[in-house]
Amino acid sequence: MTKDYFLVIRGGINSTFQDFGRENLYHIGIPFSGAMDKRNYLIANKLAGNLTTDAVIEFAFQGPCLKYFGNKRNIVVTGNVNFKVIKEDYSEIQVKNYKTIEIDNGDVIDILNTKNSVYGYLSSNGGFEIDEVWGSYSTTTRAFVGPNGGKKLADNQKIFLKKSEEFSSRLLIYSDTKIEFIRVIEGTNYKYFSEESIKNFFSKEYFVTNLSDRMGMRLDGQKLKNLKNTNIKSEGLVKGTIQVPADGNPIILLSDHGTIGGYPKLAVVISADYDRLVQIPPGSKIRFEKVKLKDAENLYKLYIMETNNILNKILWIIK
């Protein structure tokens, strides 16, 4: 019996399989990885009728172009994404983000670009036929860990799919809210920095540079000066840590970050703001606001509650 599959016509800029992340391997230098924007990842799977732990294809800026071979099935694209579905007769069907789309043999899904954002997600009803690696479908390309040999999608490869289950079409009316500031708590080396540098960090704007990827986001703006050596004893890191190297420009560590580091750590982005942080494209302005640890914990609880409410608002479309 022939399995359904996608043929990759164009791999895209940074298209990888991701899930919720790989836990409990920090001690051997393997980061969590996982979907950068967890909320859009969860929505993609829920709309597709999959488990919330199933793998999706995450893409940055320009996504993949895939030709489908198989029986009818539903796909979903989440995020602020331009894409189209082209039939064998070269006609295009109407598509929409956050809505199931029925595809058939020979259809081409062309994910053109993300709009005023960075990451988008593609899920398929039934899921992708890939193997877990160390308990996760996440891909860490710098370490070559994960399905697909730990690599990005490549032109001309085949992506096999699990059997599609019949279910009604689904729709979510959703657009992500923007926030004026990215909120942070104090880092472990907060007191290493001068009062002037701390004041500048929270009062000045920074720009997201092109030197940003799944590992980290480099910022450009007011230089920050610490009162001690910029090279300190290496210690464990967490996602969202803001390090300041010798040049004074902050670096925000993202999902594929190294597990230890020796630059002073000024602050840590709160978990409730991480999804919005990673969707800020290069060239954009960013500002920071300090909150207390207790407030960060409460904001994360609110984020979880809001995410669950969003998932529960998914509508079933009766044909």
Image (cartoon, rainbow, N blue to C red):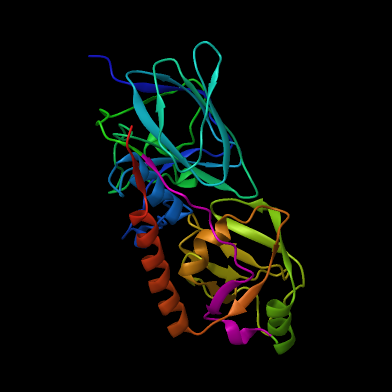
Task: Look at 74% across and 86% down and name the residue there.
Answer: 196
> x and y percent of residue 250 in the render?
66, 68
Q: Nearer the viewer, residue 116 or 189?
A: 116
Toward the left, the furthest residue is 1
- Horizontal placement of 274 versus 164: left or right? right
Q: Nearer the viewer, residue 206 or 170?
A: 170
Q: Quadrant of residue 102?
A: top left
Q: Quadrant of residue 267?
A: bottom right
> x and y percent of residue 35 in the render?
44, 50
Q: Quadrant of the C terminus?
A: top left
Task: Look at 33% across and 56% down and name the residue there.
Answer: 312
Q: Is residue 237 visible?
A: no
Total number of numbered labels? 0
Tell whether position 132 is magenta.
no
Toward the top, the furthest residue is 89
Toward the right, the furthest residue is 222
Task: Look at 44% across and 46% down and name the residue there.
Answer: 140
Tell whether position 179 is magenta.
yes
> x and y percent of residue 245 in the render?
66, 69
- Stretch in magenta: 170-193
Q: Is residue 239 visible?
A: yes
> x and y percent of residue 194 in the render?
70, 87
Q: Nearer the viewer, residue 170 or 227?
A: 170
Q: Quadrant of the N terminus?
A: top left
Task: Look at 72% across and 67% down and name the residue there.
Answer: 206
